[in-house]
Image (tube, helix red, strand yellow):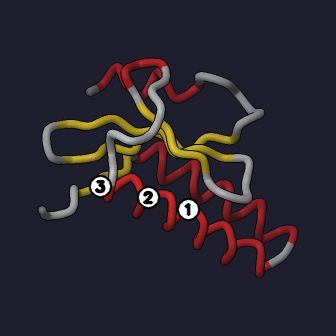
Amino acid sequence: MERNRVRLLLGAWDDWLQAEVWYASVDDDLVKRFDDALNVAVAEIRERPTSWPRTKGNCRYRLVKGFPFRVLYYLDEEVIVVVAIAHLRRKPGYWLRRLRNR
């Protein structure tokens, strides 16, 4: 079976970039570790998109190992749409507004 395609909404790209900027201000090695952990999470979502828990807005989420983030996504036919890369303790539910434009 072919892997599912992944599409990140613009807001999810912004989330990723903001996290990278913050981690870069702390330590360049931390940025690489964050990117690696995030890429692993996305790869695991691609492999088993229905394995991760459901949350609001009929989305699912996968925690990013070693970092206080989760990848929020939904399935749209054969495409996995990443809605947000959300920090676990900041602005809960901010990403829900991104679902209105499905």
Q: What element carries label 3?
A: strand
How far apart, in angstroms, are the residues tagged by discs 2 and 1?
Answer: 6 Å
Q: What element carries label 2?
A: helix
Instruction: Give the labeled residue for mark 1.
Output: 38
Marks 1 and 2: in contact by CB < 8 Å? yes
| Above or below, comparing residue 89 to residue 65 in the picture | above
Q: In this view, does 83 lie to the left or right of 5?
A: right
Percent coordinates x, y for residue 101 in the rendering: 30, 25
Instruction: Give the labeled residue for mark 3.
Output: 6
Which residue is rendered at x = 73% and y = 59% of the image? Answer: 66
Instruction: Give the labeled residue for mark 2.
Output: 42
Callout 1 crowding tier (Cα within 10 Å): few <14, some 14–19, many ≥20 = many
Earlier along the polypeptide chain: callout 3 or callout 1?
3
Percent coordinates x, y for residue 3 in the rendering: 21, 62
Give the amino acid at mark 2: Val
Q: Quadrant of the C terminus?
A: top left
Which residue is rendered at x = 46% and y = 21% of the image? Answer: 97
Q: Is residue 81 left or right of residue 83?
A: left
Give the amino acid at mark 3: Val
